[in-house]
Every structure is written in structure tokens, then in C-alpha cells.
């Protein structure tokens, strides 16, 4: 056997034949330079070539797909398999078939995401309002261009827009489409780029065309006069706030609320929701309503189900007997996605630069773009007309002596001399001579030439008219107006989204929010159980039932429209209302608050505060002797938030939480038996909830604050003994005369 050759290794143990020079060495790099060379090109590509629409209303992926379908003859032809369209689009769009097909689905009529779909689809294309309804594979579905696409590609072959090479330089594609109407505002568009995003709502086509015509005639006109409000393919009810809408029209930023539309079926005692906001799905709404039902905040529902079918969206809610459907819907509007906010961010790429523009500015940019497209179309037609006129003028000269033309051609010895001899014989240029020379012998007769030249005068009139249009912008604007009127007439639709006053909607909600008020007694136990009992039931009941080892730590006389704040051992507070709890009895344990309010796992309640107007202060006593005084108004929120984090300082263990309406005196006791009589006025209030507070009780090492209670006037023989002028204080031990009686209180 041959001996194996021993491989020499380098000092680091690597085979020198496989060792890569510099491998494993960490080289320092300038982060600014790295961002510029690696990250910035990616960011610019996403912004300019993927996520943000341009003035024609399309992202590059949309434009490549639609142009491919146009070149396939799908504007007037029959539908073809979606897989065929996807494959052809790959010549322009170097992405996977799934990404291209997803783009086509969202442009389709079947998906119902656009007011004016560009793809006429056949088959299952899913639904925009459904999260779980998936579209069929492209081999099963068919598609062609919708009739409205004729307005997108009109005159595209007349040099109306620029063309560039595709990614492998094998064909050309348009940089923009010469759209005849502002598609940028007639269909919703959203996109998330790098460091910026775009969210453009849809408007009614008729209203947009009317507004654009108005701006063409009067650039200073108020767009709100003709453009009422956004319009969505899914309909719904738009809560109209004139100031908010004016801000969106002016700046391109802002938001408005849109809510679901419903019908009440009295016979079957159910609510049928048929239109929902564009920002949510039927499944998300159902999930949220079920969550509210399980939490006990919506008790009027017997059942909820999705009855969506081929006729459209329908969510059915079966109601309990005696339920007011309108009041229930007002409650659901407040707490579920049945009412949602559409946030506007009109970010559009203009001349290669992303800009956030208002409606007026976007329409003005579109008018400038469309005017340029019309100018280029007219110039293209003018050039072609002049070329044709030039040829026909040469043909007219031949008409003067056809025999001479035949004699010149027959008498020329060489073919290459035919054109020069015709030029000399009739005084025409080379282009005209070439045209004459190419005429078949059978056409060299007076009848043919007269028929061809009879359009000369009409051509001259057309040329003069086109030159006049190019010389006057006002005439180009008239063409735009005519085109917009024609588009509105052919493709205009009635509004789908109904407009209602936001003020009226708010007043309606306030009326529904009225809570029946009646006196109640509230009980809160150490283990976190809560009971609400009427005074009448309390008078006829016995002792309060609690779990073994548990005890009632708070009993309050209150009313049904009182707010409740439950503080927990994880420095959080959960807000609720007394009305959210059912009336109970002394003989039951009551509601377990951590479960009722869906607190975090392992989270326990340590205090309950009741309030109607959020007046007064909260005092947080920490075991180390510090006290934080916080305005109760700091916990008041305008929205219906149920959970607030950082409700108090988490740096020290909490000893007690007290709610006071005004400054008073409280008794603090330490584990060492020392007493401090504290006037809360000595502590300055804070608006920050998690403030650390100030040192009040100076404690010896190993001792903590154990008791905080109200001071009962007269309970100390010498109260000044336990008071101090300055804080912090060490307090004092009970005197002999106070010790006997006070030990029972403490």
C-alpha cells in the first residue's frame, strides 16, 4: 500500500490549501460609511421602486402587471389564465410568481379592495374584508383588463410618457401611465417603505373629476365645495368633521372615523352588519366581540356568526330579549373595530422625490402631468401629420405629369439613380422621391393619386389647429376638461360610503352612555373579591360570605355610576365602572377581580379606589418611610383605557394606598412600634404617577412601615408628642397613658 502523504498545517492549525487570507479577522468599519454604501441604496430602492405610488396612482409592481396585460391584448380580448399573466409579467417584474399574483389579486374585481378595479376577474380571488378567505391558485383563476383601463393606456403609443429598458434590456416599459383621470385619489393605496409610509384613501370618481375640472378653471377654488369626503369600496358610515377633513385636504395628514353599517331584523331579533371599515376584517370584529362577551362587558348577545356568502358580507348578532339594538351598537362602536380611524398620509413620489401633499397639491401635480402628456400626444400627431402632408405634396407634383414620372423611371439605367432622377425631374426631396418610387405600377394612375391627395387640405387644417393648441395652454386645459367629463360620464358611480355628522354621532353615543344611577354598597376583600349590593338587599342579608382566610378590607357606600381603580402588586392600575358588575348578595363570594379584569398572570389587587370626578389625592406609603402624593386626576383618561402601567413607583415595596379628598391627618406606625402623626398638607402633590415621593418616616435598619390609618380626634392625650415640624421624622413611642387604649386600635 502507498503511504499517505502528511499534510503540513499552518500555525493556526488550518490546511494551507483551504486557508482563506484574512478569514476570521475583525476589521473596524465606519458606521456612517457602511450605511451610505449598504443601507441607503436599499432604502432608496424600497421608497422609489416598491412602496410609494407615483402621480399616475400606481406603484411599479401595479404598473408592470397592467402594462403586461395591455400588451397581451387583454383590454378587449377574452380572459386568460392568471398563471399566464403572471408568467408574462416576470419579463418586467423580476419577482416570484406569488408576489406578482398577490398584486393582481388586490387589483381585481373579485377581491373588492378598489372602488374601480382594474382587473376583471373570474374565480375565487378572496375578499378584502376577510382575513381567512384565501384566494385560489393562479392556475384556477382567469382575468383580463377592466373597461376602465382604456383610460389608463389611451395614446400610450403616441409618446405620451417615457419608456425605459426593463431589468435585462430585452424590452421597454413605461415609467408612468398616461391616465386620463386622477387614479391616485380614486382608489385606496397603502405602502410601508423605509423611514416613511403612504396611506391614501379613495374618493368618489365623479367628485374627483368635478374637483379637478374646477381647479383647472379656477386654481384658487375650494376643493371642499365639490369633494365631500372619502369614499370606500366597502361602504360604511363616515363620521364627518369639517375641520379635520379640511386639515387632510390641506396637509395630506390626519384621520377620520368610519363605522360599520347595520340593519335590525325585528322578526328574528338580530343585528345584521353588512358594511365594515376598510381597516379591519370580519374575523377581527367577531373575535373582539367574543372577547368582550367573555369579559362580561357585553351581555346582550346570545350568538354571533359570520354569514358571508356570494351575495356579500354579513355578520349576524342574535340579541337577548328586550335588548335595544341601537344602544348595543353604540357600545360596540366604542369598544370594537366596528368603528375605526383611517389615518391619512398622502405621500406621493413627484419627479423622483417623495412628498406629502394635500388634495389640492396632488390634483395640481396631476394636472401638470396630464397637460404634458396631452402636449406630447398632440406633438406626436402633429409630427405624423406633417410627415404625411409632406409625402402627399410630393405625390401631387407627380399628378401634374404621370407620363413623365414613368418615363424617368423607365429611362434610368440603374436602380440607385431612380430616386435622384425623380428629385431632379419634379423638384421634390429624397423622402418624397422614395415614396413615389415605392408606388406599385398599377397605382400610377390619376384616380389613385387623386384619392390619396384629397386629404391634403384637411391635413393642413388639422396641422394648423394642432399648432394653435400647442401655442395656447388654455386649449390644452379644455381638452383635459372634456376628457374628465367623458370619464365621469362613462365610469362614475354613486357614493358607497354614507356621510354622517361626527357631532351627531358623538351626541348619540353620549346619550347611550348614560348609566342608571342608584345607591349601592361596595365590598372589597383582601384576596381580591368584589361585591355590589343594593342597600335594600343588604338590610335583609346576613354576614358577608368570604373565602376561608379572607376578610373584607373595604366597605364603601357609593352609586352605580362610580369609577373603580384597582391597584395591583405589579405597579399597575385597572380601571372599571361599578355598572360593569352585576348586583350580588351577601351569600356569594362576588367577582374575582384579577379574572374579571383579565389581569396579568400572577398579578394581585392590593387596593380599590372609588371616584366620580377624580378629585383629591392618592397617597402611596412605602415600607421605607417614603410617601408619594399624586393628584387623582393623573389617572383620568379621555379614552376608555382599562389598564395603566407605572401606576406608582416600583422602586420600593408598597405599605398602603390611601385616597383623600382634602388634606387631613393620618397615623403611621412602624414595626418598631413608633408612631408618627402626619398632616398630608406637608407633602407637595405631583402629577407624575410613578414619583418616588419624599422621606417622611425615618426608620431604623430592619424596620418598615406597617400600619397607615385615619387619625381619630382625641385618641391621643398629647397629639403634639407624635407630630413634628420638619420631615422626615423618627416619630415617637406610645406614651404610657396612650398605650392601653391605643394598642387595641392599632
Image: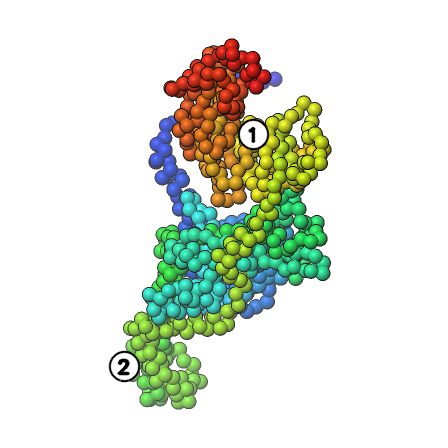
Q: Quadrant of the N terminus?
A: top right
Residue ID for mark 1:
607
Residue 197 location, x and y as percent? Answer: 44, 48
Q: Furthest-top residue in view? A: 736
**As drawn, 154 above or below 393:** above
Query: Of residues 701 and 184, which is closer to you in this image?
Result: 701
Query: What secondary structure is found at the residue carrying circle 1?
Result: strand
Residue 431 location, x and y as percent? Answer: 33, 75
Q: Residues within 10 Å of mark 2 (few under 14, many from 20)?
A: few
Residue ID for mark 2:
427
**As drawn, 714 above or below 464:** above
Q: Quadrant of residue 30?
A: top left
Residue 378 location, x and y as percent? Answer: 36, 72
Question: What residue sits 59% from the left and 61% below the top?
Answer: 121
Q: Earlier in the sequence, mark 1 or mark 2?
A: 2
Question: What residue sits 39% from the left and 69% below the top?
Answer: 213
Q: Measure the alpha-carbon separation of dots 1 and 2.
A: 108 Å
Query: Of residues 528 and 341, which is closer to you in this image?
Result: 528
With 600 as the anchor, is 381 left or right in this view? left
Query: What secondary structure is found at the residue carrying circle 2?
Result: loop
Query: Of residues 650 and 379, which is closer to you in this image?
Result: 650
With 232 as the anchor, is 545 left or right in this view? right
Residue 145 location, x and y as percent? Answer: 54, 64
Question: What residue sits 71% from the left and 53% below the top?
Answer: 321
Q: Nearer the viewer, mark 1 or mark 2?
A: 1
Amino acid at each position: 500500500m502507498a503511504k499517505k502523504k502528511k499534510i503540513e498545517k499552518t500555525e493556526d492549525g488550518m490546511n494551507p490549501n483551504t486557508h482563506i487570507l484574512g478569514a476570521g479577522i475583525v476589521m473596524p468599519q465606519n458606521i456612517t460609511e457602511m450605511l451610505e454604501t449598504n443601507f441607503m441604496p436599499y432604502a432608496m430602492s424600497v421608497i422609489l421602486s416598491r412602496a410609494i405610488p407615483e402621480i399616475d396612482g400606481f406603484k411599479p409592481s401595479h404598473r408592470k402587471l397592467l402594462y403586461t396585460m395591455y400588451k397581451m391584448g387583454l383590454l378587449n380580448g377574452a380572459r386568460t389564465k392568471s398563471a399566464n399573466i403572471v408568467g408574462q409579467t416576470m419579463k418586467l417584474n423580476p419577482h416570484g410568481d406569488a408576489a406578482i399574483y398577490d398584486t393582481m389579486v388586490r387589483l381585481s374585481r373579485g377581491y373588492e379592495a378598489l372602488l374601480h378595479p382594474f382587473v376583471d376577474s373570474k374565480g375565487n380571488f378572496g375578499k378584502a374584508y376577510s382575513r381567512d378567505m384565501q384566494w385560489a391558485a393562479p392556475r384556477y383563476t382567469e382575468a383580463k383588463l377592466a373597461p376602465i383601463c382604456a383610460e389608463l393606456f389611451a395614446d400610450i403609443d403616441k409618446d405620451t410618457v417615457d419608456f425605459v429598458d426593463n431589468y435585462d434590456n430585452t424590452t421597454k416599459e413605461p415609467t408612468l401611465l398616461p391616465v386620463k383621470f386622477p387614479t391616485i385619489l380614486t382608489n385606496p393605496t397603502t405602502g410601508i417603505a423605509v423611514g416613511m409610509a403612504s396611506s391614501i384613501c379613495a374618493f368618489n370618481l365623479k367628485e374627483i373629476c368635478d374637483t379637478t375640472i374646477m381647479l383647472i378653471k379656477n386654481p384658487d377654488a375650494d376643493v371642499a365645495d365639490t369633494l365631500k369626503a372619502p369614499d370606500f369600496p366597502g361602504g360604511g358610515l363616515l363620521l364627518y368633521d369639517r375641520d379635520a377633513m379640511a386639515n387632510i385636504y390641506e396637509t395630506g395628514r390626519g384621520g377620520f372615523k368610519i363605522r360599520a353599517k347595520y340593519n335590525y331584523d325585528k322578526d328574528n331579533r338580530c343585528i345584521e352588519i353588512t358594511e365594515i371599515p376598510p381597516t379591519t376584517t370580519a374575523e377581527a370584529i367577531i373575535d373582539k366581540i367574543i372577547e368582550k362577551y367573555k369579559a362580561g362587558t357585553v351581555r346582550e348577545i346570545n350568538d354571533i356568526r359570520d354569514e358571508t356568502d356570494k351575495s356579500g358580507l354579513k355578520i349576524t348578532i342574535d340579541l337577548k330579549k328586550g335588548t335595544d339594538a341601537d344602544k348595543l351598537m353604540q357600545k360596540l362602536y366604542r369598544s370594537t373595530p366596528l368603528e375605526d380611524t383611517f389615518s391619512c398620509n398622502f405621500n406621493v413620489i413627484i419627479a423622483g422625490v417623495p412628498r406629502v401633499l394635500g388634495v389640492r397639491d396632488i390634483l395640481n401635480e396631476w394636472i401638470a402631468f396630464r397637460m404634458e402628456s396631452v402636449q406630447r400626444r398632440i406633438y406626436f400627431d402633429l409630427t405624423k401629420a406633417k410627415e404625411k402632408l409632406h409625402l402627399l405634396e410630393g405625390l401631387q407634383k407627380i399628378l401634374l405629369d404621370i407620363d413623365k414620372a414613368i418615363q424617368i423611371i423607365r429611362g434610368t439605367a440603374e436602380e440607385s439613380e431612380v430616386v435622384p432622377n425623380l428629385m431632379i425631374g419634379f423638384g421634390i426631396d429624397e423622402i418624397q422621391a422614395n415614396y413615389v418610387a415605392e408606388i406599385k405600377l398599377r397605382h400610377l394612375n390619376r384616380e389613385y393619386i387623386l384619392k390619396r391627395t384629397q386629404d391634403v387640405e384637411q391635413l393642413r387644417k388639422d396641422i394648423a389647429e394642432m399648432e394653435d393648441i400647442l401655442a395656447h395652454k388654455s386649449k390644452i386645459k379644455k381638452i383635459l376638461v372634456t376628457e374628465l367629463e367623458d370619464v365621469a360620464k362613462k365610469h362614475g358611480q354613486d357614493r358607497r360610503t354614507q356621510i354622517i355628522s361626527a357631532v351627531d354621532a358623538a351626541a348619540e353615543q353620549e346619550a347611550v352612555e348614560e348609566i342608571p344611577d342608584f345607591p349601592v354598597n361596595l365590598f372589597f376583600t383582601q384576596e381580591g373579591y368584589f361585591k355590589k349590593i343594593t342597600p335594600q338587599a343588604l338590610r335583609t342579608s346576613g354576614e358577608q360570605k368570604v373565602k376561608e382566610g379572607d376578610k373584607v378590607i373595604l366597605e364603601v357606600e357609593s352609586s352605580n355610576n362610580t369609577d373603580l381603580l384597582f391597584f395591583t402588586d405589579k405597579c399597575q392600575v385597572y380601571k372599571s365602572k361599578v355598572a360593569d358588575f352585576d348586583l350580588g348578595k351577601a351569600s356569594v363570594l362576588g367577582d374575582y377581580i384579577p379574572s374579571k379584569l383579565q389581569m396579568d398572570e400572577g398579578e394581585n389587587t392590593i387596593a380599590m379606589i372609588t371616584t366620580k370626578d377624580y378629585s383629591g389625592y392618592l397617597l402611596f406609603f412605602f415600607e421605607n418611610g417614603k410617601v408619594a402624593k399624586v393628584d387623582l386626576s393623573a389617572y383620568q383618561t379621555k379614552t376608555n383605557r382599562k389598564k395603566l402601567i407605572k401606576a406608582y413607583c416600583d422602586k420600593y415595596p408598597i405599605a398602603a394606598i390611601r385616597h383623600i379628598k382634602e388634606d387631613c391627618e393620618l397615623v403611621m406606625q412602624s414595626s418598631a412600634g413608633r408612631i408618627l402623626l402626619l398632616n398630608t398638607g406637608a407633602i407637595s402633590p405631583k402629577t407624575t404617577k410613578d414619583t418616588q415621593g419624599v422621606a417622611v418616616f425615618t426608620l431604623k435598619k430592619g424596620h418598615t412601615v406597617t400600619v397607615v390609618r385615619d387619625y381619630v380626634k382625641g385618641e391621643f392625650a398629647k397629639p403634639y408628642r407624635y407630630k413634628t415640624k420638619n420631615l422626615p421624622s423618627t416619630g415617637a413611642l406610645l406614651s404610657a397613658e396612650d398605650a392601653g387604649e391605643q394598642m387595641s386600635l392599632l
